Amino acid sequence: MNHIDILMATYNGGLYVRNQILSIIGQTYQDWKLIIHDDGSTDDTLSIIKELVHMDKRIQLIEDGMKKNGPGGNFMHLLQYSDAPFCCFCDQDDVWLEYKVKAMFDEIQRYDNTIPQVVYANGYTWFSSKCLIGSRCASVFPKSLRELFFFNGGYQGASAIFNAKMRTCINKSYEYIAMHDQILNLSGVIYGNIHFLDKELFLYRQHDKNVTPHIVQNVKERMKKAMKNNKIPVLDKSYFEGIRAFYNVHKGNMRQEEVQCFEEFLAYPDYAFWKRIVEIMKRRYKSNNSTVYLLIKCLFRPFIL
């Protein structure tokens, strides 16, 4: 059996998907299976995938007629087809550096894989249309619920490797899925251990169809963005509903202090403006690893949309 299942959710990715799959084929670590599920593409995505399936028997296209209406649901749907000891999520439009899988596999094997484990790595933002590689994708690495709640979307699922124990934890039926990344992030806190490999292992392609936007990493730029982008909510409603759906599924397995933490947060949108400010300081909620940054966002932006 292969050691790593790489799960790729696709939709209208014809411009990018060939390069991503070829970057996986070119990995120095070769004991993997690439499992792909398409969400109803209307471009040439499927024809490109089928061409590459014939080139490499490790690539498997799932054609089950299921349409999940979004990447989050599509990725979660793919979990049922995975049976390897380790899994990676894979975006259709990135490019993996040739040593990504090997570095991630070596790192997660350092830990006790009889319990749920997830390892995240870093990458570079990549403006492919301008032939420009930008900053690192991540500069903050929260590990607690109060640091994650306002981290809209959370860490990129495509930067992670997780073990079979973690796959069992996240592979549940949810009434609502914002993004698979969020479910993996929260599960890492509730069930297992989150680790960070401080290496840049992939190119995170930036284009006008990105599901998740480029994250500004420079502290000065982040503060400027918090004040100027006054139409972007402090908390995206879809991610808030994703947290609620996660809580409804997993609360029976949580410790009492975790249940309390979720319930305090889920009550937060009902508070008046000044009570929200007080609660941020009282609960030590953070955004981009900073309570001050979150307070500034609350002053200049709508709270939830």
Image (cartoon, rainbow, N blue to C red):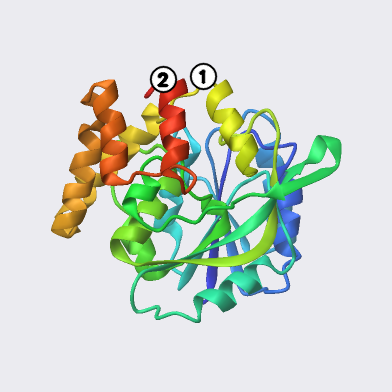
Rate crowding at label 2 as few (under 14), some (14 to 19) or many (20 or more) other CA atoms within 10 Å.
some
Rate crowding at label 1 as few (under 14), some (14 to 19) or many (20 or more) other CA atoms within 10 Å.
some
Task: Depth check: give the residue in front, 69 or 140.
Answer: 140
**Residue 281 left/right relative to 118:** left
**Residue 111 left/right relative to 51:** left
Task: Depth check: give the residue in front, 71 or 245.
Answer: 245
Q: Secondary structure at mark 1?
A: loop
- Give the x, y percent position of residue 32: 60, 69
Task: Depth check: give the residue in front, 114 or 1.
Answer: 114
- Give the x, y percent position of residue 136: 67, 52
**Residue 128 left/right relative to 183:** right
| 273 w.r.t. 146: above or below | above
The residue labelled by disc 1 is: 230
| 195 w.r.t. 281: above or below | below
| 69 w.r.t. 22: above or below | above
Amino acid type at image mark 1: Asn
Amino acid type at image mark 2: Pro
In the image, what residue occupies the spot 41% across and 46% down? 182
Find out whether the residues at labels 1 and 2 contact each other: C-beta distance under 8 Å: yes
How many tags in the picture? 2
Picture disc at residue 137: none
The residue labelled by disc 2 is: 302
Whether residue 110 appears in this view of the structure is yes
